[in-house]
Image (tube, rainbow, N blue to C red):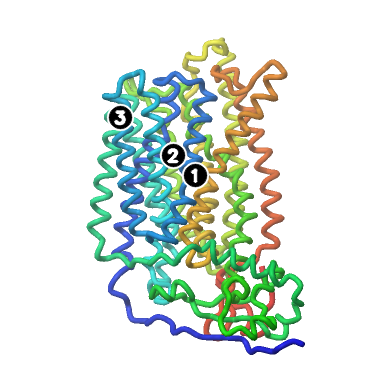
Amino acid sequence: MDTSVAPLTIHSNLSSQKRPSKGGWSAAVFVIFVEMAERFAFYGLAGNLITYLTNNLGEPVATAAKNVNTWVGISAIFPLIGAFIADSYLGRFKTILASSLIYFSGMVLLSLSVSVIPMHSRKAVFFTALYVLAIGEGGHKPCVQTFAADQFDENHPQEKAAKSSFFNWWYLGIVTGASVATVVVIYLQDNVSWVAGFVVLSGSLAVALAVFLVGIKRYRKQRPTGSPFTTMAQVFVAAVKKWRVSETHVGRGICYEDNRIGGSQANGQTRSHNLARTKQFRFLDKAMIIDNKDALSKTTDPWRLCSLNQVEEVKLVLRLIPIWLACLMFSAVITQLHTFFTKQGSTMSRSIGANFQVPPAALQSLVGLTILIAVPVYDRVFVPMARKLTGHPRGITMLQRIGAGLFVSILSMFVAGLIETARINTASKHGLLDTPKAIVPMRIWWLVPQYVLTGIGDVFTIVGLQELFYDQMPEEMRSIGAAAYISVVGVGSFVNTAIISVVQVITSKHGNEWLGDNLNRANLNYFYWVLAGLSAVNLCIFMWITKGFVYKKVENNDQTISNEGKELETRGHLEEKV
């Protein structure tokens, strides 16, 4: 016999609308400066790393490319661990502080490895320093952006409006740091010394750490809420325990709808909204069904009975996994910036005037310049125009923005292949195919289109991913959301390494191995077109995935509202809407 139990609903008061004394742009600017300095250091190293590995450490081009991809990949995967530590134990502020110290130590060690360390130990110390930096990245990357976004209170109208443009301007700031590094630092590395370049990077990190501490009294700090993975595990365990319970209980209202905030409320923090029930992954709904055993129990067992919010938070995470997978190919494409694009440029005419040579890695600044121009245009021109056509507050949805960037990445690889074909033809015409160290009489500026297209793709996909993984993750898991977005770049680097290895194995069996040390006979143009083809297939998969994606829906003031900005229906009449 079923026992009817009324839904347990407790409403928490919304935070006061009084403007808080902490947070806002006055706090966020300090954090943005820290991130600009960290990006300055990262790109000052990553942008020219393949040159140091090939020219100074004597590694083959393909091996150096794999080493760069591996380091970038691990640097982007470690944030998953850092985010877990931040959200569960230390909090974002302490994690940023600790990781900044580790990052600074790694850069100092890197400077020593290219100066005072003996030659026979230099390579080992150099790679040790690289992975100390990767550990620092692990704590820094997932927390800085989220910590800056936390400075804007979603319950305060003015701050919520400011937050709507935050991600565009945040990305604009870090691109500024990266662009300056690819011009100034790489010039020092190529024309003064590697020691000078790395010392400048170390100094920038020291200044950034000091600035971060200056703003300490302005920050709005979130307390750690405990392990979010425990909460997720409870939903799966409870759903499995009740797999025989009829789902008709849900339709009759016999389910646990405790809308208290749980761990975050216990720490004195507030949640803006309660999540609305959705129809995807309905097998998880059994976790919130109140069966006879739950009804007779005096206490709630979290491993048998979960709230509506808990269940819907797990669904949010599950929905993002296919999107994450579908964006890996985009990251595999943009890793060419630090590897083959740079080696391409090193074989071309780079002179300006009689004495000045453009460092090949400096062309990466074109990506930053493109973003510096495109972000304001997107925010101030494209969005208002698109809003008039679509009626959507963002102009286009987050997934449409990501998809547009995936399409642009296909164009960038197609164009890169055409330009590489022209370079090879020029080398052949002048009899330079078997002279790999000779400069091909073709200006390096021919590479500009592929760099510009890469920048445009970043404006759509990278910023779109940042926004999606912040907006659609549960509030207690936003550091992990940032880490998940960052890990797209990391795993994409490993995907690119795997593609290089497969291509080399297949082509070597036919006696003409691609991507060899002689770039004039490396068939790099064919490799670019392979990436374009794989990206086209990936875009089709992405479009299929997005057809079933359901955005986060929240309940506030007796209404169910989609986080994409459109009111769906009044409470009690929920319908799915993608």
CA–CA distance in space, label 1 to label 2: 8 Å
Q: Which residue is mark 3?
A: 188
Closer to the camera: disc 3 or disc 2? 3
Q: Is residue 139 visible?
A: yes
Residue at 71% x, 72% y is 242
Closer to the camera: disc 3 or disc 1? 3
Q: Secondary structure at mark 3?
A: helix
Residue at 71% x, 70% y is 282
What's under tag 2, amino acid-wise? Leu
Q: Is residue 515 above or below residue 20?
A: above
Dot 3, crowdedness within 10 Å: few (<14), some or many (≥20)?
Answer: some
User: Is 301 on the left-hand or right-hand side of 245?
Assistant: left
Horizontal and vertical percent for residue 514? Answer: 63, 22
Q: Which residue is mark 2?
A: 366
Q: Earlier in the sequence, mark 3 or mark 2?
A: 3
Q: Which residue is mark 1?
A: 455
Q: Is residue 43 above or below residue 375?
A: above
Q: Earlier in the sequence, mark 3 or mark 1?
A: 3
CA–CA distance in space, label 3 to label 1: 24 Å
Q: Is residue 376 visible?
A: no
